[in-house]
Amino acid sequence: MDAQKAKAARHSFEPSPVAPAAVAEAAQSAPRSRMTGLLDGGFTPQAPHARLGADGEAASLLRPRPPSRFGSYPSRRMICGRDEPRTAIVHYWLVGMRGGERVLERLIRLFPRADIFTHVYNPAAVSEAIRARPVRTTFIQRLPGAVRHYQKYLPLMPLALEQLDLRGYDLILSSESGPAKGVIVPPRALHVCYCHSPMRYLWDHYTDYLRSAGFLTRMAMPFMTHGLREWDYASAARVDRFIANSSFIQQRIEKSYRRPSTVVYPPVDVSLFRPSNEVEPHYLWVGQMTAYKRADLAVEAFNALGLPLLMVGEGEMLRDLKARAKRNIKIIPRLSFDELRRAYARCRALVFTAEEDFGMVPVEAMASGRPVLAFGRGGALDSIHPGVSGLFFHEQTTEALIEAVEEMEAWLPHFRPADAVREAQRFAPERFDEGVMSVIGG
């Protein structure tokens, strides 16, 4: 029971330790058998622009990758007999535990001797698995108030990345959502970027961020972001291989950087979730109560429907949503992980109103044997099988969500929890491991 709680805690809102045995087991498994492309013969570009599907096989999607301009990468002899290449993982910032940090934890399991580089690091806010590794920061860490206000230093981050000394590393894995991929790598090192999203505030969400910014930021933002956008595009050329976390992000990488990528879904530890025989009459909403998550849609729709809704999350919209919610809506800022698992397993259905890059919450609900009613854009299109594990609504309007809830009510008698659990298995951590190692060794 203690081991199960320790495992579950890694995926709660609070950081907790990783079992050393799990790290040791990972070090002995996939990486050694899948590194032949990097260690034994160098870099052979993947022929198709590919996505790794549920069966682990690559499917051709867009155009072939052009011949490599980079030459060969280190042979096994050049890595001085090490069982894994000397690896650096560059993560944008480490100030909390969210989806990007879950991916980082899994990369650490794949490369347990990797060094971690980041702009800003708050050890108290991350898990033991991350704290156990050497973490080196850029000069942003030493600037006033950087741990709390790191995003204000965004214009300096390209310069900070380019000061990192990565000489001696054979493999660089950048974890990109904020600036991370712009490092300067040794000529014969392989640079693989796992892209959670091209920086939203520079590209497709730029107008949204501009409108919601304060007066001074709104005045300065166009001047700052123009140069950052040029740097972000140029730095994509420093990446040898891109990995996208969903088909949606694959399309955004193509649009923003004109680069192909391979889809490898983020790891979701579906083994932590179980269906329940007790299903309660309320719907469930889980997430940060920020503008783009569209929690307001759920409040307005369920105010009109009168159906019970449990909302779990906090953020700048929390107070306003509590004031607007009627008595049939209960809003709780936080739940423990055990309480969250119980909420998933016993809800009538999960309501997912955001357009997310991927979105782990729907997969966790599916692994708990419950269906998902999701906005039909973004990563949800990869995770939800309509008519099997959930349904979609196609406009972010109150009217569209009300209509979709009524459709869900009619469909629920036909829903089978085992189907949702089976669909969730496609996102198990082992699939992530296989996908990443396939790209690195391909």
Image (cartoon, rainbow, N blue to C red):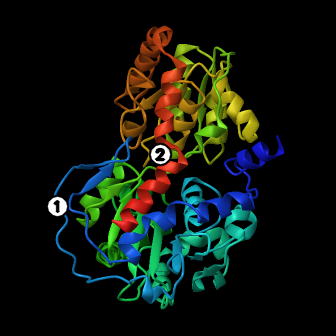
What's under tag 2, amino acid-wise? Tyr
x and y, in percent, of residue 117 in the image: 57, 77
Q: Is residue 177 visible?
A: no
- Residue that appears at 49% across and 56% down: 433
Residue under pointer 1: 64
Frontmost of labels 2 and 1 is 1
> Is 334 on the left or on the right of 117, as rendered?
right
- Residue that appears at 43% across and 89% down: 78
> Is 84 on the left or on the right of 185, as rendered?
right
Residue under pointer 2: 292
- Out of 372 and 82, give the one closest to the viewer: 82
- Out of 322 and 142, give the one closest to the viewer: 142
Callout 1 secondary element: loop
> Which quadrant is the C terminus positioned in?
bottom left
Label 2 or label 1, whichever comes before in sequence order: 1
Assess whether mark 1 and mark 2 are in contact (beta carbons under 8 angstroms): no
Callout 2 secondary element: helix
- Is the residue 380 above or below the residue 80 in the image? above
Question: Residue 170 falls in which quadrant of the image?
Answer: bottom left
x and y, in percent, of residue 331 in the image: 68, 31
x and y, in percent, of residue 92 in the image: 52, 70
- Residue that appears at 54% across and 81% down: 82
